[in-house]
């Protein structure tokens, strides 16, 4: 990948958004402010990064960094056999990013998972509801300030009670 060409084009088009561009092991990583994620990912998709391989999040509570949360997008260009990682920083006060489901349908469930486990909302997502936890679940279990032992929610589930007694089904 021609890092200098990509860097130049991104810096020209998004001068106030791109925080850092780096390359390691033939993989480019972009770090940016989250507010322009939809525009930047649209630009990268038009540039040939046609596949969203993964979308996840990181809680930077104990790591430091630009913001409390980072949403990480792994993109692939099948034609050029290139990968790019895009890291969008999201504040704890307003954990909100534009949805990229309109670009890649695979983002649908991936954004729902990040919402359910980290509490990061995706604006304009067509169905942003919990995907793994019950609707009445309170909290976001992959946040670093969530108690390791949970909050006792599992005590109400009959299967957990049977398993702790040894009555496995």
Image: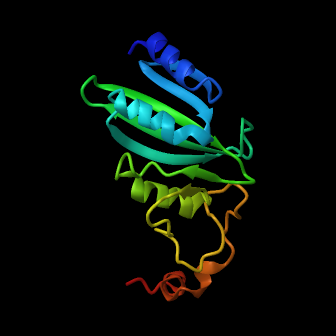
Residue extending farthest left: 79
The residue positioned 51% from the left and 89% from the top of the image is 158
Left or right relative to 57: residue 144: right
Left or right relative to 168: residue 147: right
The residue positioned 28% from the left and 25% from the top of the image is 81
The residue positioned 37% from the left and 42% from the top of the image is 52
The quarter of the displayed image where residue 12 is located: top right
Left or right relative to 1: residue 153: right
Using the image, determine if residue 58 lies above or below residue 44: below
Task: Name the image colouring.
Answer: rainbow
Q: Report the quarter where the C terminus lies.
A: bottom left
Looking at the picture, how far across and down is residue 50, in whole percent? 31, 36
Nearer the observer, 18 or 114: 18
Looking at the picture, how far across and down is residue 47, in whole percent? 36, 26
Looking at the picture, how far across and down is residue 111, in whole percent? 48, 55
Using the image, determine if residue 102 lies above or below residue 65: below
Looking at the picture, how far across and down is residue 44, in whole percent? 41, 30
Q: Report the quarter where the N terminus lies.
A: top left
Residue extending farthest front: 13
Total marks placed: 0
Using the image, determine if residue 78 lies above or below residue 161: above
């Amino acid at each position: 990948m021609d890092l200098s060409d990509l860097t130049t084009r991104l810096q020209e088009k998004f001068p106030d958004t791109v925080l850092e561009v780096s390359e390691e092991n033939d993989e480019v990583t972009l770090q940016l402010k989250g507010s322009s994620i939809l525009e930047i990912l649209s630009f990268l998709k038009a540039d040939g990064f046609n596949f969203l391989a993964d979308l996840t999040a990181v809680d930077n509570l104990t790591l430091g960094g630009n913001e409390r949360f980072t949403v990480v997008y792994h993109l692939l260009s099948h034609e050029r056999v290139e990968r790019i990682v895009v890291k969008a920083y999201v504040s704890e006060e307003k954990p909100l990013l534009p949805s990229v489901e309109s670009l890649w349908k695979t983002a649908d469930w991936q954004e729902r998972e990040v919402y359910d486990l980290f509490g990061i909302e995706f604006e304009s997502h067509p169905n942003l509801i919990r995907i793994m936890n019950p609707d009445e679940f309170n909290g976001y279990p992959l946040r670093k300030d969530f108690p390791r032992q949970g909050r006792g929610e599992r005590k109400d589930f009959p299967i957990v009670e049977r398993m702790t007694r040894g009555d496995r089904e």
